[in-house]
Amino acid sequence: MRWITAAIVIIVVGVGLQPSQAQTRLVLINEVMTNPESGSEWVELYNPGWLPVNLSGWRIDDSVIGGPHTVIAEGVVLLPGHLLVVPLTSVILNNNDPDQVQLSDADGQLIDQSPLAVVPRAHTLARQPDGGATWQVGLPSPGWWNSGAPPTILALPPPATTTTTDEIETVEPAPSEAITTAEPTLSPVPDETELAATPTVTAVATFEQVVINEIAAAGESEWVELYNRGEVAVMLAGWMLERVSNSGTTVRRELPVTEIGPGERLVVGFTKGVLPDDGARLTLWWRETPMSEPVHY
């Protein structure tokens, strides 16, 4: 994320910022978009702990809990060391007066809150570094690290028990490359008309969750159809299609910054010549991480 010179810095003594072995579901508000150029307001959540957290029924409010709010859908799980972008289902945040975001669990317990602040249009208020106590105003980076690199896990693993080593289950933090992310530049979130009654959540994309389903290489119109065969939506910001021709020439084309829901298909068009008529090998990538098996045609 590129930070503007006139950044505001707010030190917060907040919820769960100190490591503790007692922490079992540590979730932080990591970035907040209060006044987007287009589309919905959104909140990015971060799990810096060692355990997955089931966010079913958790809610996002503004500075006053009990008014218009967003409830996270059933079955949404935030894995250790991962980010989650939640578009808000209604406009709840002030644009010209100080406001904040508050995160509560399904039992109504307050988990975390952002500082009261006024944020310029198309900018966000974000922790810098990720999961830290300092907040800054800058350009948005939904689903990608505010500091440009994965932070150190804050929470300690659970204390060892008296069971034998073979009986202990080790929970490793998932690699940051597996996150469905956006480039650290200004990137729109889905338009409000595309949002369902419950929030569409950009969750972790697994390998082969989004696959190449159909290819049109011949003719004046070249396109590739993608299919999300998973159970959660995927934001394609930062994703690319890699083409390796039979002669060995490699090109990459960025995919549109849009969301593809579970069970949905997306047709992506390309300029003529990107998909050679005599065949090639196609692979989906997120940054430098392959996200699909190569498809030959």
Image (cartoon, rainbow, N blue to C red):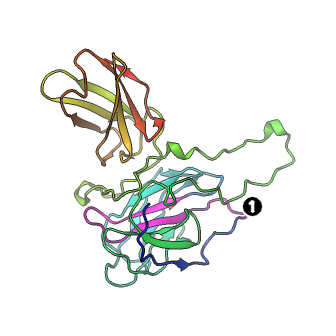
Q: Is residue 104 magenta?
A: no
The residue stretch that appears in magenta: 20-46
Q: Can residue 106 be seen in this snapshot?
A: no
Closer to us: 37 or 277: 277
Spot occupied by residue 13 in the image (x, y as percentages of width and height): 61, 78
Against 224, residue 179 (above or below) is below
* Nearer the observer, 246 or 161: 246
Q: Residue at x 28, y 45 (%)?
A: 256
Q: Amino acid at mark 1?
A: Gln
The answer to whether residue 72 of the structure is visible from this angle is: yes
Q: Percent position (x, y) of residue 81?
A: 58, 52
What residue sits 34% from the left and 66% below the top? 41
Q: Nearer the viewer, residue 74 or 262?
A: 262
Residue 117, how many percent across, how many down?
43, 80
Whether 292 is drawn above or below 81: the answer is above
Residue plotted at (49% across, 74% down): 114
Residue 83 rendering spot, x and y as whole percentages? 50, 54
Number of disc labels: 1
Residue situated furthest bottom in the rendering = 97
Q: Quadrant of residue 241?
A: top left
Mark 1 surroundings within 10 Å by alpha-carbon count, few (fewer than 14), some (14 through 19), many (20 or more): few
Q: Which residue is mark 1?
A: 21
**13 left or right of 166?**
left
Nearest to the observer: residue 257 or residue 40 = 257
State yes or no: residue 34 in magenta: yes
Question: Picture quarter containing residue 281?
Answer: top left
Rendered residue at 61%/72% (across/down): 15
Dividing the picture into quarters, in which one does residue 109 lie?
A: bottom right
Secondary structure of residue under mark 1:
loop
Query: Which image quarter holds the N terminus?
Result: bottom left
**Image quadrant containing the C terminus:** top left
